[in-house]
Amino acid sequence: MDRQQILKNAAFVGLPSPVSSTHHQIPQQSARGRVRFTPASWDKYFDTKRIVNVKENAFSIFEKGSLGPVLYLIHGGGFSALSWALVSKAITELVACRCVAVDLRGHGDTITSDDSDLSAETLSNDIADVIRTIFPNEQDSPPIVLIGHSLGGAVCVHAASRNLIPKLVGLVVIDVVEGTALESLACMESIVRGRPKCFPSIENAIEWAFRSGHIKNPESACVSMIGQLMPMDSSSVGDSTDVCQAVSACDTIMEDGAPPETDTPKESTKTLIWRIDLLKTQPFWLGWFTGLSKMYLECPTPKLLLLAGMDRLDKDLTIGQMQGKFQMVVLPKSGHAVQEDQPVKVAEALATFLVRNKIVEAASEFQRTFPCC
């Protein structure tokens, strides 16, 4: 596989390629000229965070707004509900809606009886169980729009095709296409292994996310990276050799040899590792994406496909788009984490779609986004 194809596949699955050295504009600097990557709290963007108990499982959800249809937000593999922080704040200022973002099992602060079962069937059942627990009376529940990024988009399509979501009035999929996703799986393992195994601090992790292109928007990285990591302990890692190699690898991502400035005392920092080991999800990869395009096109609800580039489209979706079976918007300046990289543009595209299909009413004037031809 050539370098160009590796970069393309790496961008699609949402992970920076080990052969990429692209750097982005640095967001903020202190008085002494050093870059700052200070973590931001979720409550700057969401109104509430709570736990929804479904049998023996405890799902963490974040909410914004209280009136109107529910935008049910499902994050991608390895991400968390905090991936929707900036979009939730932006969209609720444009239209009358309520955002509900959930941490999938094995992700974020959600804890289940089996965090390792990430099959499409289990995940789609999970999001249906959570929404039915929040709104137990189907007759009184508000209209629901499913919005999913990457793996989350696949989960939304599976849930919609199985008629699991009550009062479903819209389906939005962000940067996931069956054909491209299946092609990308061939290099997925090497890409995952190319990431740092751990980070000495959350500031260090935020800097890596921004400099590597994992998340191109520094504000979003400051809030969302927190949900992707957890403190390293003896049960989280292998033998002592692996730990030493992982901690040593953390130091290599700093460009100037000095840690970013932070108000956090040095003694309070802990070594952080990824919340989920993506390599262990490999048995589920084919199940997530196989047949996705057909299921998506057959869903009878209004549909929107948001992409980072036209090259994402496969044959089935290209034909479906030409036949007008769904709306499509391309935001070419984004990486794979489209909703994090360009939250305002995504909010405007969502608002345009929702108002056009008479799902919501506009709360303010905004820049209307026209679907691609």
Image (cartoon, helix red, strand yellow):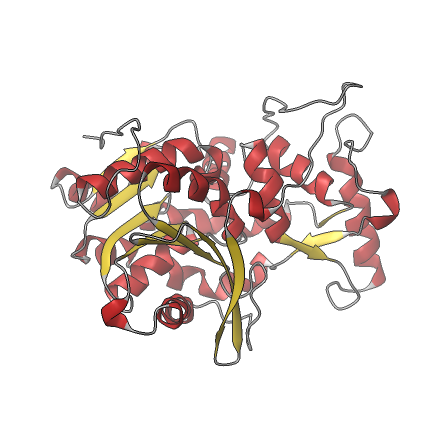
Position of residue 252 relative to residue 28, above or below, is below
Residue drawn at x 50%, y 40% is 10
- Using the image as rendered, state which of residue 217 and residue 285 is in the foreground: 217
Between 219 and 123, which is closer to the camera in this rendering?
219
Q: Is residue 125 above or below residue 67?
A: below
**Going by the picture, which residue comes out furthest to the right?**
267
**Residue 70 at x, y = what percent?**
33, 55
Q: Point out residue 113 in the picture as x, y percentages from the top left corner.
A: 56, 78
Can residue 234 be seen here? The reply is yes
Q: Residue at x 78, y 51 (%)?
A: 271
Name the residue located 73 percent from the left edge and 64 percent from the top edge.
Answer: 236
Give the side of residue 19 with respect to residue 290, left or right. Answer: right
Where is residue 319 drawn, in percent x and y? Answer: 16, 42
In the current view of this chain or complex, which residue is farthest to the bottom?
55
Q: Is residue 322 above or below residue 121?
A: above
Report the residue at 36% width, 47% height from top. 176
Q: Residue furthest left?
A: 323
- The answer, for residue 214, to whether it is visible in the render is no
Q: Nearer the viewer, residue 273 or 353?
A: 353
Instruction: Indicate the position of residue 49 as horizontal and vertical percent values.
Output: 54, 58
